[in-house]
Amino acid sequence: MSRKFKRIFVVVADSAGIGYEPDADKFFNAGVSDWGTNTFVHIAEKMPNGLNIPNMNALGIADLDNIRGTHKVSHPQSYVARCRERSNGKDTMTGHWEMMGVYTTEPFMTFTDNGFPKELIDELEKRTGHKVIGNCAASGTEIIKELGEEQMRDNSLIVYTSADSVLQIAAHEEKTGLQELYRCCEIAREMCMKPEWMVGRVIARPYLGDNKDNFKRTSNRHDLALRPTVPTVMNLLQDNGYMVDCIGKIGDIFDGYGVVKTQKTVSNEDGMDKTIEETKNFDFEGLCFVNLVEFDSEYGHRRDPIGYGECLERFDKRVGEMMKVMKDDDLLIITADHGNDPTWAGTDHTREKVPLIMYSPSFKNGRYLEERESFGDIGATIAENFGLKLYDNLIGKPIKELLND
């Protein structure tokens, strides 16, 4: 088939789920199952006047659930659907990998309850030459405030985790040094390739400041992720000469695998600035894949529904700006990688379906579509658009309505 879209933009509103999965009772937050979670709906209920998201409303998001502040409209230039996750997990890597066709059956290791095993910490201390402090599940900003002065005094390493599959190391960017922090993280990544310690990501978390009242994490975060277990739709595009333009932490999530171009970001606003700039000025053929992490990191994990709602409202304005500069042969897909219901127990992600909001200026028959069975339908649609056959071990079915409108 001939190509319909020259450029496809996939923008991931990290953690903006839209209703619990059928198997949500098998996933837990602080002893409470994820059954009943709904990030979008529960945020809207907490906002004084519901969510003020006129652009996503015009694109048909109200077809997906009863989101306070939205209402159903005709939307011929957009298709909307809910999308289920087939993989066994509710973390960043599992969600993003599935979008590009990877089916994950075994969830990544987590160490939320008791921190990392003594054997791992002892080996990390021996190999890095630094004492380890912390070793617990914690908010990154809070643990730096609590232990940062001790870390600076002793030139130690603050090691912590979360409900996600991560080992994070925080150290002062000037006292310890950025390159030394990165070296220690490389050692931790090598260690955490063992099956019993295999976390999805090791993350360097540098900070600056001279006391607990002014410590602040810097933009020099560095993620060391596992490489996808099989080549993905991104590799398929790259192998066939198409652009794979990654904005935010996408490059880290895929360990650079299948990435042609990458740009780091410091915030959602910065991410949308870069995405809109690419939309206006970067004439490519292929995929622009974007992650906006602050929904998750700043508001979901911190259980701040009002902050999350306001962040969604800011994002909605940027969506409107982006739509104005899109070309007729562009496709925008707004989605999420999991839920993180800020009204729920604990601080973990929540096992949820995600929205698919799919807009092109060329659409004429946009409408609500039935629920999709896999995040992999995104990648399958991209491959089909460019006339490419999925690798045999990838999952997903093309969303034919987008390609036939």
Image (spheres, rainbow, N blue to C red):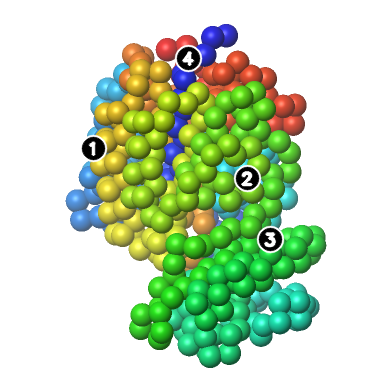
The residue where tag 2 is placed is: 256
Q: Residue at x 42, y 12 (%)?
A: 405
Q: Nearer the viewer, residue 350 or 193?
A: 193
Horizontal side of residue 375 vs 359, given as left or right: right
The numbered mark, 3 or 2, whose residue comes first in the sequence reads: 3
Q: Residue at x 43, y 48 (%)?
A: 292
Q: Are marks 3 and 2 in contact (CB under 8 Å)?
A: no
Instruction: Point out the frontmost of discs 4 and 3.
Output: 4
The residue where tag 3 is placed is: 199
Q: Is residue 229 visible?
A: yes
Residue 4's tag is 4
Q: CA gap, disc 4 to disc 3?
A: 39 Å
Q: CA gap, disc 4 to disc 1?
A: 28 Å
Q: CA gap, disc 3 to disc 1?
A: 39 Å
Element carrying mark 3 = loop
Q: CA gap, disc 3 to disc 2?
A: 17 Å
